Image: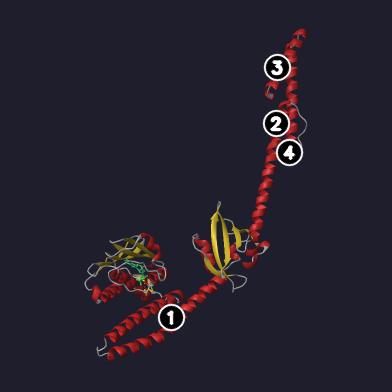
């Protein structure tokens, strides 16, 4: 029998007793009234006891009760016990998480919706100079680098921002924000001093080697020219050797020039001006047309007169590389189209050829330094593998993107997309 059935059974029995007693004494209504009053007072007493127990936090064992009230006490007691267990487990997890993040070598700061510090680990206190008392303070008031504040405000956290550590400017930090939960953000700062040092060493090494190679190359080229002038054609071996040596020094010269250009792109400040792109393209195409293998192949479509802010020499290198590739990697009698046009949100340069095309898996790799696609061709195509790396760098410095569409055997289209914010005429 359930508790409810028992409770109802007792009530009915009491009513029956009241009815019998009432009819024996002739006061049925009085007996029923007294019984109802008794039951009501009992329930009121139980409710008040229950309320008192709850108001004291429902702590400890519940008061002794009978019938349905024992069940009610027991259910509430069980819910509270489970809740307590869950809380304990959760706080253990939070503690473990805190301990592990405290031990992290990278700085971690939890930021609230108004950039206020909600929590920071030990590394954050050390490397960002935060104090325990800084909780609730806005992070831009403590990490005051304009670049960091711009990054924080931008809301675009796809990339990290590289900054010196506020406590020690010899330490370089890569700071990154990760969004999570409702309006919360986690600021992570990693010490990249060694990485940056090695990167600088690599750049310096490439720059120095390329620079040092220039003089011996010039001397070699000079002697080779003299030898060529002196060659009377009587020794085919000599003629062939000189030609081979000239070809190779030429190749090395290109390599050194490209490496130096890349170094310049990585290290030099930009000199920004308003560049007349249609004029620049006309000049590049004219120079291209003068080449033996390119005569009559280039078609220039200037659909807009848009000028953009940028560095003319860098843009010239990038566009020349793209045109050079289109001519190199397509048959000598095929057309190459250069198109300067604009849409609502971008200004675009398309360099389109009807050449050998590029296999889809190769496309993401061809902008890497020294990467050249291995293709069996009827003619040998010279190159350094640095052309598209230069293009990528130049475009990056102009907030532009390179988009490549290609189909093997059909041709390729290299599109440079410049943002409209760069329009200057
Ligand atoms: P490279 O000096 O070898 O031309 P790039 O960096 O300019 O170096 O190009 C890298 C590779 O991408 C090239 O070796 C070539 O295989 C491929 N490539 C570049 N442009 C084209 C194109 N228009 N058509 C087909 N393949 C291309």
Q: What residue is shown at x 45% (from left), y 74% (from top)? A: 266
Residue that mark 3 sits on: 12
Rendered position, 93 above or below 64: below
Distance between the alpha carbons at the discs numbered 4 and 1: 80 Å
Task: Calculate the distance from the C-alpha at mark 3 to the C-alpha at mark 4.
Answer: 32 Å
Q: Which residue is mark 2?
A: 72
Quadrant of the image where one finds ligand 1:
bottom left
Numbered disc total: 4
Q: Are marks 2 and 1 in contact (CB under 8 Å)?
A: no
Q: How many C-alpha atoms fall within 10 Å of the one at disc 2: few (<14), some, or many (≥20)?
A: some
Quick one: 287 or 216, which is closer to the camera?
216
The numbered mark, 3 or 1, whose residue comes first in the sequence reads 3
Q: Secondary structure at mark 2?
A: helix
To which residue does mark 4 refer? Answer: 58
Pointer 3 residue Cβ closer than 8 Å to ligand 1: no
Secondary element at tag 4? loop
Spatial CA span between label 2 and label 1: 86 Å
Q: What residue appears at the point 27 percent right and 73 percent down from the top-left corner?
A: 285
At 69% from the left and 33% from the top, the residue drawn is 75
Of residues 50 and 404, the one nearer the viewer is 404
């Amino acid at each position: 029998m359930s508790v409810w059935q028992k409770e109802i059974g007792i009530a009915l029995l009491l009513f029956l007793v009241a009815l019998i007693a009432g009819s024996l004494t002739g006061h049925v209504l009085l007996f029923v009234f007294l019984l109802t009053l008794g039951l009501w007072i009992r329930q009121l007493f139980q409710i008040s006891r229950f309320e008192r127990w709850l108001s004291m936090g429902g702590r400890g064992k519940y008061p002794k009760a009978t019938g349905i009230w024992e069940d009610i006490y027991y259910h509430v007691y069980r819910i509270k016990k489970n809740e307590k267990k869950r809380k304990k487990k959760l706080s253990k997890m939070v503690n473990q998480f805190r301990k592990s993040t405290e031990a992290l070598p990278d700085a971690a700061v939890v930021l609230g919706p108004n950039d206020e510090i909600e929590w920071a680990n030990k590394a954050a206190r050390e490397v960002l100079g935060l104090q325990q008392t800084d909780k609730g303070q806005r992070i831009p008031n403590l990490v005051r680098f304009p670049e960091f504040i711009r990054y924080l405000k931008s809301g675009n956290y796809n990339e990290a921002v590289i900054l010196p550590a506020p406590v020690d400017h010899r330490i370089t930090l890569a700071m990154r924000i990760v969004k999570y939960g409702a309006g919360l953000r986690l600021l992570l700062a990693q010490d990249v001093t060694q990485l940056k040092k090695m990167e600088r060493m690599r750049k310096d090494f490439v720059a120095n080697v390329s620079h040092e190679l220039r003089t011996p190359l010039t001397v070699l080229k000079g002697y080779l020219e003299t030898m060529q002038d002196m060659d009377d054609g009587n020794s085919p071996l000599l003629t062939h050797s000189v030609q081979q040596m000239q070809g190779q020094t030429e190749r090395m010269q290109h390599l050194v020039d490209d490496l130096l250009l890349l170094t310049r792109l990585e290290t030099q400040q930009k000199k920004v001006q308003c560049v007349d792109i249609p004029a620049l393209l006309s000049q590049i195409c004219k120079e291209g047309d003068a080449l033996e293998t390119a005569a009559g192949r280039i078609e220039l479509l200037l659909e807009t007169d848009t000028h953009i802010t940028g560095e003319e020499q860098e843009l010239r290198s990038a566009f020349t590389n793209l045109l050079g590739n289109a001519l190199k990697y397509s048959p000598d009698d095929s057309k190459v189209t250069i198109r300067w046009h604009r849409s609502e949100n971008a200004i675009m340069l398309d360099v389109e050829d009807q050449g050998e095309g590029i296999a889809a898996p190769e496309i993401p790799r061809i902008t890497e330094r020294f990467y050249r696609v291995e293709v069996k061709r009827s003619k040998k195509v010279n190159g350094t593998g640095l052309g598209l790396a230069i293009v990528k760098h130049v475009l990056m410095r102009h907030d532009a993107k390179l988009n490549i569409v290609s189909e093997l055997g059909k041709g390729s289209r290299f599109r440079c997309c410049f943002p409209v914010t760069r329009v200057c005429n």
